Image: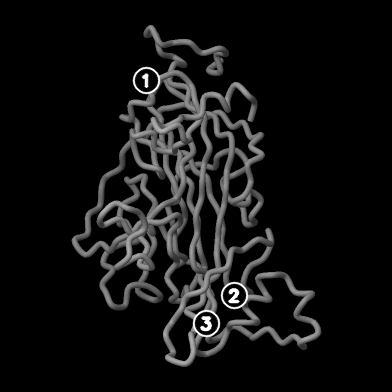
Amino acid sequence: MDASSTNRVQVASDGQVSALGGHGHASYLTQHDERWNDCPYVVELVSAAWDPDFLGIGSSPYEGDVGYTGIRVPAQPTVDQAHRYLYRLVGIEIPGGRMIVVRGVRQYVSLRTPGIAPPAGVQVPLEFDVESPFWHFIDGNVSWHLRWEANLQTRLNVFDRNQLPGTSPSLAGLDSALLYVPPLFPPVHFGPDYVPPGAGIPPGKNVFQLGTWHDLRYPWTNTDWDMSLPIHGPGRLVFYASVHQTNSATRPAIAVPPAGIGVLRPEDQFVSAFESAETPVFYGRVAGALSVELFPCCGYAGPRARCDVDLMK
């Protein structure tokens, strides 16, 4: 990212860089957002959703806030390829006559185990950040999809009165959510009863080479954003993840002698150290982030039309 782009990153009133800036939500940007009426700057959108880990304590000073970065993955195993968990990580609506340039992408996935704290047997969940770019369970994996739906700002909404926090039955939204086809009734929320929309295939067209990929090529700690993918409105840009949850009850155990544990990848070391019948290890959380430069004035004839370069040509 060049210096001119960096200088246009939105800064909140308290002087800190903000993905919200007091104008919207951290994980999505709609076509009606007032930032489309200003001159270019960079906005980062980050997955955020309801997290049961924060029930009773909250996740911020704001009453009732139990949201956290990323979206939890159900522990129930995926039954087959057509029932993979489909996640909408972040989304952007681009109005007609406007455009964005995608400057950076970030990915995150974690492993989780309920954990046991002796002697009382209280569960103390442990979460481990996946770092090895090509690691996956032998019976599970995560794929990533950046998709574009041209000339489409809104879809036909689907409503479900039994909708759970952190989920959505509608492809019309932009918020971070696990997508599903109703009904989805408790207590058997997921596993064999979970049905993703569209057989789990993310809608829309591939965005350049990022329509589908399978590795962590853009790690969460990455800030070397030299990407430049121009996308013209009107339409919707959505970042999806598809998760095939592992089945720890049927997955072969890692059989490694103690002297060989140190040569394993960190993820295999975590699985080997903590997995048991009482403490299975599975995918715990996924998250995505997009750093995008908004070009509201391209094609805009008003007094704020001050694009240095006409990227629409």
Pair 1/2: label in front: 1
Q: Position of residue 298 (x, y in %)?
A: 47, 16
- Determine the CA span between mark 1 and mark 2: 48 Å
Q: Secondary structure at mark 2?
A: loop
Q: Is residue 197 left or right of residue 84?
A: left
Residue projecting furthest to the left: 161
Q: Residue at x 47, y 35 (%)?
A: 16
In depth, the one of 123 and 300 nearer the eye is 123
Q: Residue at x 41, y 45 (%)?
A: 27
Point out the image quarter for the C terminus.
top right
Q: Is residue 123 left or right of residue 226?
A: left
> Which residue in the structure is indicated by mark 1?
37
Where on the picture, by quarter, is residue 233? top left
Q: Earlier in the sequence, mark 1 or mark 2?
A: 1
Q: Secondary structure at mark 3?
A: loop
From this viewpoint, is residue 6 visible?
yes
- Determine the CA span between mark 2 and mark 3: 14 Å
* Amino acid under disc 1: Asn
* Amino acid under disc 2: Asp
Q: What label does residue 139 carry, if any?
A: 2
* Amino acid under disc 3: Pro
- Determine the CA span between mark 3 and mark 1: 50 Å
Q: Are marks 1 and 2 in contact (CB under 8 Å)?
A: no
> Which residue in the structure is indicated by mark 3?
280
